[in-house]
Amino acid sequence: MSKKSEIRKLALELLEQIPDGIRYSQLVKMIQLNDHRFKKNTISGAIWNLDEVSAEFVYKPDRGLFKLIKYGDEYEEIDTKIKLNPNDKSTTKQIKEEDFYKSFADWLEKEIEECTKAIPLGGKVFNDKWGTPDVIGVRESKRGDIVQFPTEIVSAEIKTDSAGLITAFGQACAYKIFSHKSYIVIPSSSISDDITRLDALSRLFGIGLVLFDSKNVDEPNFEIRARALKHEPDMFFVNKNLKVISDKLF
């Protein structure tokens, strides 16, 4: 067996162990760690087109990401249950989207300082068929700010179910009519191709894209993939909707 064949065989074995796929640079490092005989340049020459030379086994769901075909879209595992007691298999709690509203509101306020105040909302608070954001926040100038700026409204749509990403994106777009910035928050475990498409769409429409661990309520690890761009909403709808929650938000 030639060196290239050995390297490709090892690459397939490593991909077998990681269903979510491996980035090109990661795969090179892992091969080096597993077999010190192979030099970096030799490995690169053997696997840069792995999806072509081993097309019956490997594909690229995203740029620079190798993944086994058998672990494609249909492999995606959606498990939204957590055990309250590891020793009691019968005791489980279903994780709900609402469980992440407060933590994301705090993240908008304290972590990325996109808002001076953010609150969980959701439900049908606005009583509008165009929907109510899961989280809404406001960004205002502080008394000590030398340069004062106009008040900004920030809205967010959170999804724990990867099956509803297209709907969630549509909702985030709808929120722009009364928000200066709008975010869509989706599971980091979503299909790579879906994340890539949403990333591209978010940048085209100025929507913020955030990934998070939808299985961990205590540590969601929110991470910005694309930051929301500011635009001017329709002030009629801004005032119409904010009247309903002014006592909570201001």
Image (spheres, rainbow, N blue to C red):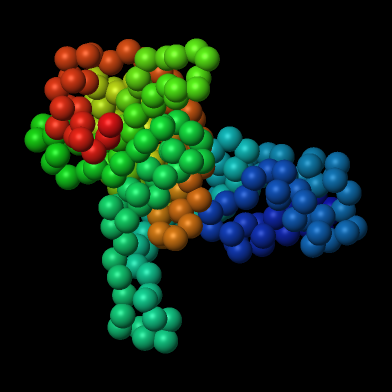
Q: Residue at x 75, y 55 (%)?
A: 30
Q: Is residue 170 left or right of residue 239?
A: right
Q: Residue at x 21, y 31 (%)?
A: 246
Q: Residue at x 50, y 19 (%)?
A: 145
Q: Residue at x 35, y 20 (%)?
A: 151
Name of the residue lying farthest toward the bottom: 87
Pick whichever, 250 or 12, lies toward us.
Answer: 250
Pick whichever, 79 or 151, lies toward us.
Answer: 151
Q: Position of residue 96 (x, y in %)?
A: 28, 57
Q: Position of residue 172 (x, y in %)?
A: 30, 31
Q: Position of residue 154 (x, y in %)?
A: 34, 29
Q: Position of residue 44 (x, y in %)?
A: 79, 42
Q: Quadrant of the C terminus?
A: top left
Pick whichever, 204 or 145, lies toward us.
Answer: 145
How many numbered discs? Answer: 0
The quadrant where residue 116 appears: top left
Inspect this view and state whether residue 190 appears: no
Q: Is residue 22 left or right of residue 244?
A: right
